[in-house]
Image: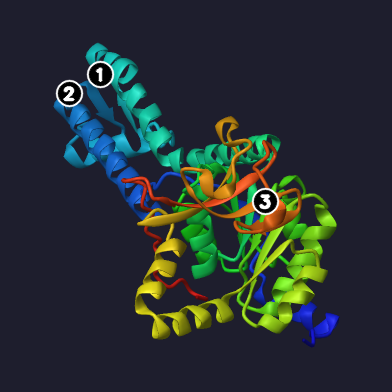
């Protein structure tokens, strides 16, 4: 596989890059236009209420121009009073009017100002709160999972891993599309907008502290560069990547990936198997779908199984993981099971735990 030149890659990254920022999951709030509209309505209600309070005791006020105060003058007085302009041409002269100004109109003036500047205060408060959440998130994030690419493959990978107990708070999605990252945060994951081939983007995802990295990009050359960058930043993380072409798998492993899944070849083999044996194809598809029918899981050997052969366990064992080797269930070198072994088994999915991925197309699926 021929990789594009570094200059071309840099230009493509700059063109695709929207911004480098971290987006944390948040509750759905009211749209800004509705917030502003609601505040304007509240301000008008306070203004109207003040005007009618003044008009109810208009004899207690004096207008320097004509002496009397009518309804229009009441609205005028309410406007200049609530906005703290205070021209002084209309003044309260009776004791009742002055007491009303002290105990009623003054609190209304404070309320009116709070409503008007509420949007600005809310923005400042939200910004401070968001910065605090981001700082706390960075300080507490450890041993998390970074998923590069939130397309069909990336979303399916996240759902599969989360079905085994990983919390959504422990997943960080990296994608160059801001709309895709917004979709990820709407699902409860943290997101970073940016090109994952750049080290500063991966550092924003705290990849240096991650336990595992899933690379599910749309291009094989991008996956290679992401693997190289991620491995440079984190020597101990487990990196799993997907490629479209099988010939690119060795290059991905040389770039630092621990495991490489060839999506096109896997789909092709499943299609061929379904043609030869539809029932076998259905079983394989059932195994691939997390939480439905049959599941394939990896678990440790329990004490009661130590000393037994792989076929003597209650579960259907297909492979035994011993050290760094994966041995078939019928490999004679397995002998009897050891406490340090791990078993890859096929089990019946637990009822009620079926996870159905939402695979509706996103912008770059």
The numbered disc on residue 134 is none
- Which residue does the numbered mark 3 point to in the structure image? 321
Furthest toward the left, the residue is 56
Residue situated in front as seen by the camera: 62 or 113: 113
Query: Residue at (22%, 38%) from the top-left corner?
Result: 48
Measured as percent of width and height from the top left, residue 97 is found at: 25, 18
Q: Taking the image as drawn, is residue 14 in sight?
A: no
Residue situated in front as seen by the camera: 61 or 322: 322
The numbered disc on residue 97 is 1
Q: Earlier in the sequence, mark 1 or mark 3?
A: 1
Q: Secondary structure at mark 2?
A: loop
Q: Secondary structure at mark 1?
A: helix
Residue situated in front as seen by the camera: 110 or 341: 341
Whether tag 2 and tag 1 are in contact, CB under 8 A, the answer is yes
Q: Nearer the viewer, mark 1 or mark 3?
A: 3
The numbered disc on residue 57 is 2
Query: Residue at (67%, 70%) from the top-left corner?
Result: 17
Residue 286 lies, with reference to residue 106, above or below; the image says below
> What is the quadrant of residue 85 in the picture?
top left
């Amino acid at each position: 596989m021929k990789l594009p030149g570094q200059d071309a890659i840099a230009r493509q990254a700059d063109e695709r890059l929207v911004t480098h920022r971290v987006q944390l999951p948040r509750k759905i709030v009211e749209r800004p236009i509705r917030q502003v509209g609601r505040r304007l309505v509240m301000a008008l209600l306070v203004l109207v209420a003040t005007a009618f309070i003044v008009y109810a005791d208009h004899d207690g006020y004096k207008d320097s121009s004509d002496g009397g105060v009518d309804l229009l003058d009441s609205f005028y007085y309410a406007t200049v009073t609530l906005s703290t302009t205070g021209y002084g041409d209309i003044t309260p002269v009776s004791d009742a009017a002055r007491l009303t100004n002290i105990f009623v109109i003054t609190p209304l003036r404070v309320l009116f100002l709070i409503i008007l500047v509420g949007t600005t205060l809310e923005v400042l408060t939200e910004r401070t709160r968001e910065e605090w959440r981001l700082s706390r998130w960075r300080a507490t994030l450890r041993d998390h999972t970074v998923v590069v690419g939130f397309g069909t493959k990336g979303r399916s990978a996240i759902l599969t891993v989360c079905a085994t107990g990983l919390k959504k708070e422990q997943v960080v999605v990296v994608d160059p599309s801001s709309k895709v990252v917004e979709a990820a945060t709407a699902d409860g994951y943290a997101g970073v907008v940016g090109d994952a081939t750049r080290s500063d983007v991966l550092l924003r995802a705290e990849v240096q502290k991650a336990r595992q990295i899933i690379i599910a990009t749309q291009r094989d050359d991008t996956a290679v560069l992401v693997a190289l960058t991620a491995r440079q930043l984190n020597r101990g993380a487990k990196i799993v990547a997907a490629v479209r072409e099988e010939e690119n798998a060795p290059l991905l492993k040389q770039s630092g990936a621990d495991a490489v899944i060839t999506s096109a070849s896997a789909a092709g083999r499943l299609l061929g198997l379904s043609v030869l044996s539809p029932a076998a194809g259905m079983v394989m598809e059932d195994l691939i779908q997390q939480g439905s029918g049959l599941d394939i899981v990896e678990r440790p050997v329990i004490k009661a199984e130590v000393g037994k052969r792989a076929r003597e366990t209650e579960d259907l064992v297909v492979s035994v993981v011993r050290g760094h080797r994966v041995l078939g269930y019928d490999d004679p070198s397995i002998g009897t099971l050891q406490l340090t072994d791990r078993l890859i088994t096929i089990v019946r999915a637990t009822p009620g735990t079926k996870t159905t991925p939402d695979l509706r197309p996103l912008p770059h699926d």
